[in-house]
Image (cartoon, grey):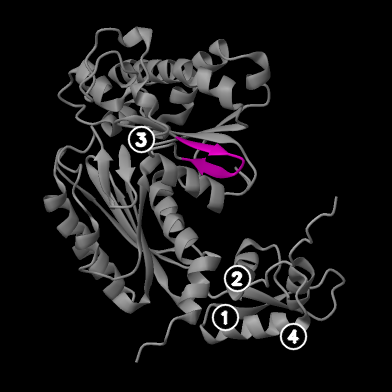
Amino acid sequence: MSLAPVPPPQPTSAGELLALIRSGRATTRGELGRVTGLSRTAVTARLATLERAGLVVGGEQESATGGRPAGTLVLNAGAGVVLAVALGRSRSQVAVHDLDGSELASVSHEQEVGAGPHEVMPVVVRHLAELLASLGRSPDDVRGVGISLAGVVDAERLMSADSPALAGWDGVPLAPYVRQVTSAPVLIDTDCNVMALSQLRVAPTTLDERDDALVLKASTGIGLGLVADGRIVRGHRGAAGQLGHVKVAAAAGLPCRCGDVGCLEAVAGGWALVEALGSDEVHHVRDLVTRAVGGDGRARAVVRESGRHVGEALAAIVIVTNPRVVAVGGDMAGAFDVFSAGLREGLFASTTALAGRDLQVVPVAHGERAGLVGCAQLALDEVLSPTAVDAALSAPRRG
């Protein structure tokens, strides 16, 4: 039996070289040649294309022997910007980031609980335009926009698909609002997924590119970003990670804001804790966390008990997925020591010894900025992908 010949590998494109430079896998012409198998001439030609587009610039890196600096190549972070928009139930954050993911300017604004897109998005658009102007940037400098929402999103139609937390947002396209600021590509994902991206892409000391992790957002609601082998798991309809609506015995018969009964959120979500406290001084989960951090005994007990319920519900997922890390974000992470004590109690009492062995429970990187960092990374992963870069390089120049 004769075997069909193996086709030769396709030539590595300029966009793929940029991806190697961005990741740090290859940062000199020699390294690019060794990693890709391209000739020096081919590497030089592709780099010239990237340099003419302003995407790559030369840097310097001292050699290990202390000799002459080796010519290194880096992404030109100033070659454009991306916009980040993290939309929450009572607060929205917007920011401008460079192409390296560094935040250049940001603003956050409080909004009425239940405010719809027709009230919130014009404010977001105004803030984005003002931030760009303050940086001396024009709409043409924007390469992409990353948006996050609570609940399930429709990534193709750029809208909320099912969000109990954001009444009035389901089915409302957000792209028309963004088009008032820029015509750049718009990406959308859940708040938990972008938080996972902020860990995976920007905090390699916490997670690496082949890691398995659960990124928990414990705030008004409860959700998960699932990372398997370094990739975000979104599920068949983008609805993976809805931990807050897992049925738990402690919530039996209790109504949830999703319209069902018995959900984890009904005993552990921030909205339920605030309602249960019935205090005139606690209007939001952030108020509860502030009191817990300040030493209020009742608040600390409530936060810890929330963590315990979440840990018990999380245990089955830990057994099934065997992550290395559980990273905790959201408003509850403001009282990380108290919340995680309850989380560990519920989790390790209910999981297997093997699944719990070496499992780390840590706060998310970037704290309250995790959503913005993740939204920026969502946009960067798309607009700086090899396919997008190659398409942009081959497009006719305007003007």
Under mark 4, the amino acid is: Thr
Q: Which tag is nearer the camera, tag 4 or tag 3?
A: 4
* Residue closest to the eye, 169 or 82: 169
For mark 4, give the secondary structure: helix
- The tag earlier along the polypeptide, 2 or 4, is 2
Residue assigned mark 4: 41
Q: Is residue 147 left or right of residue 99?
A: left
The C terminus lies in quadrant: bottom left
| Residues marked 4 and 3 touching at CB (< 8 Å) | no
Q: Quote the CA–CA distance across marks 4 and 3.
A: 53 Å
For mark 3, give the secondary structure: helix
Residue assigned mark 3: 331
Q: Quote the CA–CA distance across marks 3 and 1.
A: 42 Å
Quadrant of the image occupied by residue 293: top left
The secondary structure that most of the magenta stretch takes on is strand
Residue at 34% x, 74% y is 135
Where residue 67 appears, x then y in whole percent? 85, 78
Q: Quote the CA–CA distance across marks 2 and 4.
A: 16 Å
Q: Quote the CA–CA distance across marks 2 and 3.
A: 37 Å
